[in-house]
Amino acid sequence: MSNSPGGEPPELGFAHAFEPGTGPDTLLVLHATGGDEHQLMPLARRLAPHANLLAPRGKVMEGGTTRRFFARRSMLDLDIDDLMLAADELAAFVADAVSAYGLDPSRVMALGYSNGANAAVGMLFRHPGVLAGAALLRPVMPYEPGEIAPLPGTRVLIAAGTHDAYSSMSATERLGEVLEQASADVMISVVEAGHELVERDLLVTAEWLGRDAAA
């Protein structure tokens, strides 16, 4: 593992937290709107007890106080150009972090919630192969990507809520279809909930991640 003097994380383009694990897997932990690199770390450790945890901090400030990975024009109007830029920057961050921390590049999976899940979708669309998989908690279908590069062997969990104000079930199904058409191995879990996560989401995600860790 490589750290800069004083125990501070190395400069990799994003302020971030890194917590080593005892296994070979790494979770790229992507926070929701208003969070930071620490927001989901306890949850990530619960869901993946043995994984390395790598959590970048979003760079976009909404209203001067609310942190995100990419901008939006309104609650339901995403800035797709900025999403693509964020996806590119996160892909570069993962490559740099793999080198800096001595991680296995073939075993990096995303765990993203809300805005973080959408950032992970952008990475899947634009940078196939960077992520071995992604647990997408309450994502949206951000845009129609057209033809995307194949994603064979890439595992994707989409955890949707039936009453999610940000994403309809048809949009959730469409996201799954696009990823399946790219040959990803997609699982969709639907719970009776809104945009908030419930215990069933966590149980399903932990089981899904555990199957990968045992592979």
Image: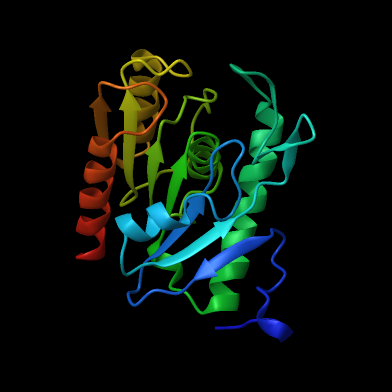
89 up-or-down from 115: above or below: below
- Could you say which is closer to the camera, residue 52 or residue 34? 34
Q: Observer-nearest residue: 134 or 148?
A: 134
Q: Quadrant of the N terminus?
A: bottom right
Residue 198 place in picture, x, y as percent: 30, 33
Residue 14 can be seen, yes or no: yes
Quadrant in the rendering for residue 161? top left
Left or right relative to 185: residue 113? right
The quarter in which the C terminus is drawn is bottom left
Q: Estimate the x, y position of residue 183 in percent, counting from the top left.
A: 32, 40
Q: Is residue 86 left or right of residue 215?
A: right
Q: Is residue 38 above or below residue 63?
A: below
Rendered view: 34 above or below 12:
above
In this rendering, would 74 be left or right of 203?
A: right
Residue drawn at point x = 73 percent, y = 40 percent:
60
Q: Quadrant of residue 78?
A: top right
